[in-house]
Amino acid sequence: MAENKSDPMDMLRKAMADLEQRFDEMGRAIFGTDAFAKSTHRATELSTKVQQATSDQMARNLSFLNMPSRADVNAIGERLMGIEAQLARIEETLERLAPFEAKAASGPPRTRKPPAKKAAPQKPKAKKAG
Amino acid sequence: MADADTAERPDAGAAMRALVERTIQRNIKGLEYFASAAPPVGLTPKETILKRGTLNLYHYKPLADELYRVPVLMVMATTNRGYVFDVSEEHSFVRFLLNQGYDVFVMDWDHPRPEEKSLTLEDYAHRFIGDCLARVRRETGEEEVTLMGYCMGGVLSTIYAATHPDEKLKNLVCFTTPVDFTQMGLFRHMADPDHFDVDRLIDATGNMPSEMLAASFEMLRPSTRIAGQRTLWDNMWNSEFVSFHRKMERWSNDMLPLAGEYFRETVKKLMWENQLLKGTLEVGGKTADIGSIGIPLFHAVALHDHIVPYEASRHLVALAGSKDKTEIVLKGGHISLIAGPNAARRLWPTLDDWLAERSV
């Protein structure tokens, strides 16, 4: 980018951008190490174990209070999802047996043609393959 | 001597005045920024014509008096909201397409519900896209449809096209679509099977939490947040910049969790085994061989994409069996390729040029 000599803030802006770029490079170097990946995943594993233990305990408490747990609600959700999927399959079968009327007539006509090409337009870098 | 100095800096006084003016404006508008509500997004009129759990299919109201025959079905990446295609009136990809005469449908995603943890790659790449194509055909009365996917939406669209070579798709349009997952840099490293146990994680969490996904995206460019705030403050005097920045910031913070099984399959089949590149990926009992794609293909990639590098996406056009295939490399990053002023100047008109003659 060209330096804007008339803007007194430009030097500061440039310095900040350089600093951010170096910070990114440093970050990527750290995040790209095996040690970082291993420790991150260990921490995630630990947190999911704690989450799991808390959720198990909560499920036991809810069961004691004769209330549905998250797993129970999810199970109902899964059954509803199964019903939705079955309805979709029925809809699909019905459509095959008696196709729905298309709504094409309701919108604007589908008769548009591409505009005529202008002479030698300036295009971004593109390559035609094959 | 003094004359030479003046020649070097002819408008130093004017620059100083502009700096003071901007500083005052920055403070006034900075206060407005904190006092005002987040600007609305996704306002182009549309109708939800299909809702199935996490999936929404929108049909945008046509804005042209005459449409191209072939409708466009856009598939959004599964990690983010589809309103990136319709950020604001002046920065809306959807509105641009509507004004150019296309009939636009968008597949967008909501948070997958806990019970949707069982959704698989097959559900996303076959069932959802297949159902939406059927609905688009019913709405328009047209058999042929252009399938258009962004990022992971591009992967799903590619898988669909590769596993349905006989289906009446007119064109396949992809933006920054990875095919070689060994080239996905830090994502690949963090998902390395040597230290990442995807089974244990998904068995415990059900769906892949969006916070974890957001953290992994941030690791690719750790200064993003600080740089964003700095740029915002620097441009606080510019209302247009602030409005667009807020909308994009809202979008990038609005990440979605991923359905557990779908994430598990993505990691194992795509990240670990690189099955899409190798042509061994099986979805719904069919092999996703990119070479079997024979329809016209357009792939736009970004020169400075830090999320999907060119090395990861360059194989799509190279592998496709289409005779009519175009790859275009544009300046910009992963998001600025499709949204914002740069996209409006570069990608959108280029795509329109390509697509118009293939939509009749």
Image: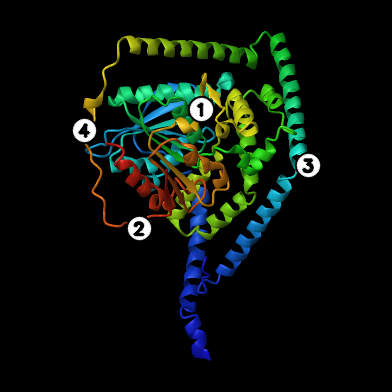
Report x, y in % for residue A67.
Answer: 65, 10
| Identity, as a three-letter code, of the amino acid under mark 1 | Ala
Q: Position of residue B319 (x, y in %)?
A: 49, 38
- Check disc 3 and report the residue beneath it: A35
| Crowd around label 2: few <14 · some 14–19 · many ≥20 (10 Å) | few
Q: Residues within 10 Å of mark 1 (few under 14, many from 20)?
A: many
Q: CA distance from mark 3 to mark 4?
A: 61 Å
Q: Is residue B36 visible?
A: no
Secondary structure at badge 2 equals: loop
Tell me, yes or no, whether dots 1 and 2 are on the same chain: no
Q: Chain of mark 1?
A: B
The disc placed on residue B288 is 1
Kind of residue at badge 4: Pro
Residues at discs 4 and 1 in contact (Cβ within 8 Å): no
Locate residue A81, reporting x and y percent: 51, 14
Question: What is the spatial separation of the Cα atoms under label 2 and label 4, in whole angstroms?
Answer: 32 Å
Q: Earlier in the sequence, mark 3 or mark 2?
A: 3
Real-space CA distance between mark 1 and mark 3, rounded to the nearest whole angstrom: 36 Å
- Look at mark 2 in the image and give the residue it sits on: A122
Three-letter residue code for mark 3: Ala
- The residue that disc 4 covers is A109
Q: Amino acid at mark 2?
A: Gln
- Secondary structure under the numbered disc 3 in the rendered image: helix
Quarter that holds the C terminus of chain B: top left
